[in-house]
Amino acid sequence: MRKKPSYRDRWEIEGLIFALPSFLVLLVFIIIPIILNLRYCLTNYDGIRAEFDFIGLENFISIFQSDSFVVILMNTFQLSLIYVVGLNVLAIILAALIVRVSARFGNFVKSLLFFPCLLSMVVVGFIWRLIYNYNSGLINVTANKLGLEFLIQEWLGDKALILPSVGVSIIWFALGYYLIIYYAGFMAIPVELYEAADVEGASPVKQFFKVTLPMLAPSITINVVLSTVAILAAFDLPYVLTAGGGPGYYGSTLAIEIYRYAYNSIQQGKAFALSVILAFISIVIALIELRLFLKREEVN
């Protein structure tokens, strides 16, 4: 007589059945594309012809030997630094200010700051191109009206200003999303800690650095890692703002260069190879950040 399946066995089988659709989606849209990417990055595939040859590491060697690679890599790191630091510092400060205002105004401010996240990045890019326009942009026109001529700049044409300008635009777009995470972190901090700090005579500034920041450690870890990975792979908004990575290569990033290889020069093999390099850089930086910030959480 066959043994009747136990409750645990039935539960495991049912769990596998329910997980199957998600696994199929993961397989089709993530795992298989990664495998194909690793295959094509070692070929001279151009995305058009069905025939292509295995060329080994030639795509990677060609990318590393390119005169523009170092410039583009440094651009990517510079933009990431501006974005990650500026975004997280500003989001923490604004979240702290919102916590101190009444619930009524706090909800309004949170909704206002979150609104840009609902817009398309392409739309945001065109909006900020209008704002940065040299002749009729909001910044230069306002500076001219106020007699602040030194503020009139070629925001998207000066190689020294292009990346900070792009960074400000992306921070404006993404600020609300990360602010909500920090706001939730503030709400999870026990009030008793601040009451104890008041009893000890700690000033508001000292409370912020000794109580608030240590208790926000999990939120900081999440936001720093998420924002780093997001900016390394950001394409839409930087591409629109810089008109394809200009001027020259000074506004280009690794994500924009992948697009150039894939659709401008029709070198899909190189595009796949550069995407592998970008993925590797993103994974390494994310792991380093996780290690550093998780260790800081343990200390706190």
Image (cartoon, helix red, strand yellow):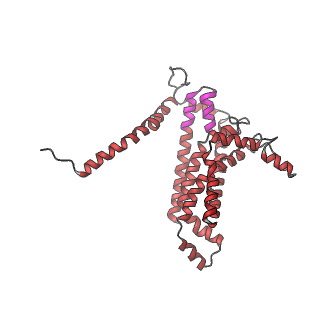
Is 282 left, or right, of 26 in this rendering?
right
- Residue depicted at 55% across the width and 45% down the height: 282
In depth, the one of 255 and 277 nearer the eye is 255
- Residue depicted at 63% across the width and 31% down the height: 260
Task: State whether residue 58 appears in this view.
Answer: no
- Residue depicted at 81% across the width and 41% down the height: 136
In depth, the one of 130 and 1 nearer the eye is 130
Locate the N terminus and report the quarter of the image it occupies.
top left
In the rendered view, would you say 242 is above or below 55? below
Indicate the position of residue 280 as horizontal and vertical percent values: 53, 42
Judged from this view, the residue extending furthest toward the front is 104
State which region is magenta: 250-276
Tally of numbered discs:
0
Indicate the position of residue 143 as horizontal and vertical percent values: 83, 50
Judged from this view, the residue extending furthest toward the right is 147
Is 34 left, or right, of 240 in this rendering?
left
- Residue depicted at 48% across the width and 30% down the height: 39
In the rendered view, would you say 236 is above or below 198? above
Indicate the position of residue 225 as horizontal and vertical percent values: 55, 51
In depth, the one of 56 and 28 nearer the eye is 28
In depth, the one of 72 and 265 nearer the eye is 265
Residue 218 belongs to the span the image colors magenta: no
Indicate the position of residue 132 as horizontal and vertical percent values: 76, 43
Task: State whether residue 165 appears in this view.
Answer: yes
Is 78 left, or right, of 194 in this rendering?
right
Judged by its main secondary structure, the magenta piece is helix
